[in-house]
Amino acid sequence: MNLTLSHLIALLPLLIVCVTVIVVMLGIAWRRHHVVTASLTTIGLNAALVSLLAVLTVTPIRVSPLLLVDNYAVLYMALILIAGLASTTLAHAYLEGFDDQKEEFYMLLGCSVLGGLTMVASDHMLSLFFGLELLSVPLYGMAAYAYRTRLSLESGIKYMVLSAAASAFLLFGMALLYAESGSLAFADLGARLTEGGGHASWLLMGIGMMVIAMAFKLSLVPFHLWTADVYEGAPAPVTAFLATVSKIAVFALLMRLFMSAPVTDIASLHTIVAIIAFLSMMVGNLMALRQDNIKRLMGYSSIGHLGYLLTVVVASDDLALLTTGIYLITYVATTLATFGVIALVSSPWQGSDVASLKFYRGLFWRRPYLAAVMTVMMLSLAGIPMTAGFIGKFYVLATGVEAQLWWLVAGVIIGSALSLYYYLRVMVMLYLHPTEEEQYDASSDWGQRAGGIMVILLALAVLVLGIYPQPMIMLVSSAILG
Amino acid sequence: MNILFLTPLFPLLGALVLAFNPRLPDRIAGLVGVGSIGLAALVMVWLNVTFYGGANEGVTQTLWQWVAVEDFRMGFSLYLDGLSLTMVSIITGVGFLIHLFAAWYMREDLEGGPGFARFFAYMNLFVFSMLLLVLGDNLFLLYLGWEGVGLCSYLLIGYYYENENNAWCAFKAFIVTRIGDVFLAIGMFLLFAQFGTLNIQELLRLAPEAWGRGDLMAELAALMLLGGAVGKSAQLPLQTWLADAMAGPTPVSALIHAATMVTAGVYLIARTHVIFELAPMTLGLVGLIGMLTLLVAGFAALAQTDIKRVLAYSTMSQIGYMFLALGVQAWDVAIFHLMTHAFFKALLFLTSGSVIIACHHEQNIFKMGGLRKTLKLPYACFLIGGAALSALPLISAGFYSKDEILWLAFDHGHTWLWLGALFGAFLTSVYTFRMIFIVFHGREQIHPHAGQGLAHHVPLIVLAVLSTFVGAMIHPPLENVLPAGPEGQFGHSVQLMLEILAAVVAIVGVGIAAGLFLGRRRLVRSLVQTKEGDRLWRFFNSAFAFDWLYHRVVVRPFLFIGRLHRLDWVNSLMNLWPGLALMLNGLLSDTQSGRLRWYAAVMTGGAIATLLLLLLL
């Protein structure tokens, strides 16, 4: 296959991020400078974001058998790049107080973003695996970045070991599929599946193993145990990155895989996914109930949220793609802002993060705007109307009702009811009168710094999208149709 | 008519400006508060001019689409016809005069203290809600105004909230009227379920097509509407709140609890008269309620010592007359009486406000006395207003409207209602002139300082003029809205005779009042001092002890049931769920051991289970 100009344009975001990573690496080798490194990364990611406009002129286009750049991919690329940018901004403020090498962080982050971009455009098992590993391996490093603190190191190692095991499942599943269908492209796999016959059970095992690997990455029950520990131990900007970029990429890919290969038509797989979804909603929300560490709490809440979203996979109908897009946008905005607040309160790094809920007691009286942002985020996570979270949840429910998945609809409702308890607990904490104990606060000029501005913008976006979701819905539906 | 929307808009803007700037200087706050109603009144004048110049028909102005669900559509639409024009004229016209007077009253009352802007914010919001109520072209909008009016009434009764008793009075008014509101809501649901629309004109068109005369559904719908009307208009059995509503500032009593809000029930019935015509039993009930209320209120007014409570009970009885008129299908006369009543009752209340301020916030009529020499203008106003209230013949506005009601009740064959109403008229003139004689005649007991200034004089004089026969010359343009009612049985000569009879009864009442209360009141005093007399007096004073009755029959059982439900088993059952959730939370938290090998083991176990299920299912 010849590489034409339009192929190059389609690859532009990946290339730009690649170059950014290399430049950052060389820059570090030449002379260490935190601000310059962070700026370079920001510029690179922004350039990649802008280049998406150019990409839109050539979509849909297949670049080699591995990658399919269509509007769907562009939408999630944009989301990943925005989440990456947000993490960079947060990291910059956070790492200022870090007493070790700061600059490599941006290189790892760039690599990971690159992996995410590859994944959402992949149409082939090979690019899937390549992207997933490129996304995950830097994350181990990022999670353990503050390796002198025990928690951070522990979280990195736990994540690495378990993630490697999950990758083994993925590879084994692919091997089985290849053995059966003789091809690694999603489309061929789909064709092979609809044909039927042959060793159907081997195919089934292959797909099952892939599902297990993805479920691990999405921290779904029963592959969820790592979530809270890793969320808690990793530095706050890393958690923000992990909770957004990795979920977007994996879920977008999962949807593409399931849409091109209609595996959920298989009754048993359908049931399994439904069980996983239901369990995740219940277990995630139940575990969060009495959690006093806000990062762990967010980890559990993410289990529940991904459980809600998995309803969409079970439904796999016309509405599913739209719902995925809308839910991921709203969830990512909300999660980023939540971890943004945590990161801002924990910045600059002082040895560990401010994650215990008691430190947030009375935040409103000290940093009213920051507390307001956090309030909006909690409301959005709980799916209260007038926030973006409500729109996302509404679409999930609509999808569930449309497909008549009553068990899952009930699960979403019970899960939401449970979740209200702990989200409101966080909110109440913000407005209680502060105690005399030692307080941790965001620096008083947080609002003028990049991280602060980003958090406020996200909060506004969550509100605006909650009140006037039409543009977002239009955007996502045009991305699906393209 | 495209400026119709300005009528409610000005009061709303006034309310918003005042609500968001509570610290405005009194002078500016007064200007905004009174000016907004003044502008609305100007619009009202323009509406009248164009209305009489035009086709004299109903016009709808849709401001925007309010609700659009499937094929159910409802506009935020205003509807103007003769009836709503009459109401708008009363609300903005009388309302403006009362606002003007209130500017004087509140300045004297608050003596520079805070709360001036708050008062006018509430008052403007009230006028806005009331205008919505009468202009709404669908029941939903009417209900919005209805509730807004109730809210403002609550806020204004509890205006002096530092005094706990006032807060309780406000609660009482809110809760009792809320009972009526629930009936109105049910009525709305019923009509909507039947016809699929809430547009009033459409309902009035559809109802006779669907229902025959005396249909059960028609009776039920009319009964529910009546329930709402009874609550808002303080008629039996939901009348207990009105006397306590006098806890608010006096201009509030004038505006809300005499001239406008309490007439909302009359308006509602007149507006939906078609439904009531289909429900003869309920219509009979309307007349009966009116008669009973006017008698109960008349007796109660005889035994009050607070000048405002006398007027409150007189309001209740006059609205009873309106209900009676509605009950005998004298639709237009009910509205006519509503109008004249608005004039003279606003006059009486404002004058009593002037007297109260003059007497240093004294409200007990037995502590006033002999005020006619010092308070000349209030005395004249009270005489004119009192004459209108007792329907003294020829010179007063009340005569023309009230006598018409009496005559039509008789003419349409409701002899019992007529008799009750006639007796009520007698009571009215007795208690009215009892009050006048006690307050303005006899020994002087207090040194009043008379009210000064244009804001004080102008409203009183204008309303006084309107309370004479001049006011009765205004005829509301109701021909196209309300039907004439059934044919009468009697001729003109009978009418003349009855009118003379009614006039004589009123004058005799004045005479009796003069005999009893002019001079040294020895007879009354000796009567009250007997044991039976005292008991009767207390019975009348408490307005037939309805409060006592309701406390026994409603409040106490309710509290009892409430206490029973403190140990609610349903609730204890619900409490199981949080316990269950916490238990599960505990179990699941134990899985978070933090050990990598355990995590890996669970993951493997999960994978095996997944694959097994895949193969087996």
Image (tube, coloured by chain):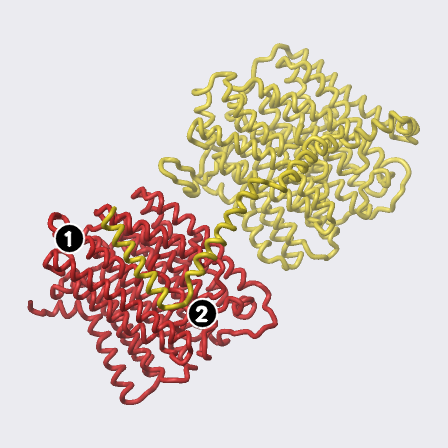
Chain colours: A red, B yellow
Q: Nearer the viewer, residue A442 or A266?
A: A266
Q: Residue at x 34, y 61 (%)?
A: B602
A478 relative to A352 in the view: left or right: left
The residue shown at (55%, 74%) is A439
Residue A425: where, in percent of width, then height?
Answer: 51, 59
Say above or below: B573 vs A452.
above
Residue type, mark 1 in image: Gly
Instruction: Using a 10 Å C-alpha cutoff, classify the residue at mark 2 as few (fewer than 14 neighbours), some (14 to 19) or many (20 or more).
Output: many
Circle 1 residues within 10 Å: few <14, some 14–19, many ≥20? some
Question: For this rendering, which residue is in front, B477 or B410?
Answer: B410
* Farthest residue, direction bottom: A30
- State left or right for residue B398 relative to residue A473: right
> Is residue B461 at least partly visible in the picture?
no
Asked which quadrant contains residue A211, the reply is bottom left
> Where in the figure is residue A276, as x and y percent of width and height?
32, 53
Q: Number of marks in the image? A: 2
Q: Secondary structure at mark 2?
A: helix
Q: Position of residue A411 (x, y in %)?
A: 39, 48
Chain to which the residue tagged by mark 2 belongs = A
Nearer the N terminus, badge 2 or badge 1? 1
Q: Chain of mark 1?
A: A
Please report the residue visible at 34 percent of the width from the left and 73 percent of the height from the top.
A157
Check residue A190 in the rendering and tell me which mark sits there, or answer none: 1
Where is residue A189, by image quadrant?
Answer: bottom left
Labels 2 & 1 near each other (Cβ < 8 A): no
Residue ID for mark 2: A342
Rendered view: A385 above or below A73: above
Q: Is residue B402 above or below residue B20?
A: above
Element type where label 1 sits in the image: helix
